[in-house]
Image (spheres, rainbow, N blue to C red):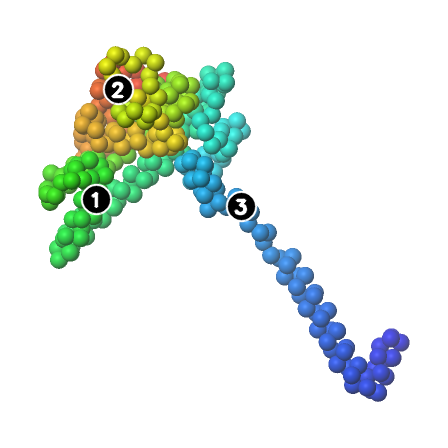
Amino acid sequence: MNLIKNLLEMIKKDYTYLVVAIITGLVVLTLLLQHDWQSKMPLKVSDTSDSAIEDRSDKGKSDKAGLSQQESASQTAAPSEQLVIATQQELPDFASIKDVKQKKKQFFAYLRPMIEKSNNKVKYKRALLDSLLDQRNKDSAHGALWQKKLRKLAIEFSVIKSSSQKALTNADIEQLKIRIDIIPSALVLAQAANESAWGTSRFARKANNLFGQWCYTKGCGLVPNQRGKGQVHEVRKFDSVAKSIASYMKNLNTHRAYAELRNIRADLRRRGQTIKAQKLAQGLNHYSERGQAYVDELISMIRYNKLE
C-alpha cells in the first residue's frame, strides 16, 4: 500500500512518472498475452508429414503406398507386420522368417498397400475414360479435343500404336473399356507368391521382380541361370517392388496372351458381378508353360490362403 501511495505522490509532482507507469503496464500485459497464446499453439509439424514422406520415397526410388494406406494397414496388422509395412524401403528378407504362417502374413501385408495403390491408378484412368466419352457425346463441337485425349489412353493401353494416324473406331473404344480395369488383389498376391517363392527368389531379391517378367534388351535385367542356348531374354529389373506390380498389371491388361482374362473380366462387368480372382485366373493359361496346371495351382493357393 505504501508503494502505491508513494507512486501516486510522485505522479502528482511529475506526470513523467505516469507515462512510465502506463508503458510498464502495457509491456507486462503484452508479455502475459504472448505467453498465453504460445501455450495454445500446436507443435511444429515435423518432417514426417505426408509430403515429406512421399518426397523421401521418390528420392529413394521406392514407390510404396501413400501414407493413409500404410496407416490403415498398420492399424490392423500385428506388431511385426507394422514394422514391415512402415519401415521397409526395399524387399524384406522373407527368407529369414522361419515360421511359415508368419512369413505368409508379412508377405501379404507388405504387398497389399502397393497393390491397392496400383489398382487405384487404374480406377482413375477408367473414370477418366468414362468422363471423356461422356464429354465427347455432349460436346460434338470439340470432338477433336476429346479424340486427342482418347488417343493418348489408347496408346498407353496398347490399343493402337503411337505411330498410328487413324481415328479411333468404336471397336477401339470397346477395347479401351475392356483393358482399363483392375486386377483383383487376391490374384496379384497368389501370382507374386508363386512366381517369387514368397519373395525369396533371386529375381525378387536382386531385381524387385515378383512376377517373372522378361525383357529383351541386353543389360535390362538378370540373366536366368538356366537360359537356353540362343535365347536372349533376361528377367527384368525394377527400381522398386511397386513398379514391378504396376508393370505386371499393365502386362495382364494389354498383352495379347491374356485376352481371355480380360474377356472374362468384361463379361463379369456386363453381368454386374464382382471381379473374382479365381475366375480371372482361368485366363492365365499362357502365363506359364505349365498351362492349366499353373492355373489350378493359383486357384488352390487363393483358396488355401483364403485370399478371397
Q: Between 126 and 95, which is closer to the camera in this rendering?
A: 95
Question: Dot 3: what SS?
Answer: loop
Nearest to N terminus: mark 3 or mark 1? 3
For marks 3 and 1, give the CA distance: 37 Å
Nearest to N terminus: mark 3 or mark 2? 3
Q: Residue at x 65, y 57 (%)?
A: 39
Question: Dot 2: what SS?
Answer: loop
In the image, farthest residue toward the right: 2
- Residue 13 lies, in percent from the top left, at 84, 87
Nearest to N terminus: mark 1 or mark 2? 1
Q: Which residue is mark 2?
A: 232
Question: Dot 1: what SS?
Answer: helix
Residue 186 lies in what quarter of the image? top left
Q: Between 74 and 96, which is closer to the camera in this rendering?
A: 96
Residue 173 lies in what quarter of the image? top left
- Residue 18 lies, in percent from the top left, at 77, 82
Q: Nearer the viewer, mark 1 or mark 2?
A: 2
Crowd band around label 1 with a 10 angstrom C-alpha radius: few (<14), some (14–19), many (20+): few
Residue 155 lies in what quarter of the image? top left
Q: Residue at x 58, y 54 (%)?
A: 42
Q: Which residue is mark 1?
A: 152
Is residue 263 visible from the viewing direction of this image?
Answer: yes
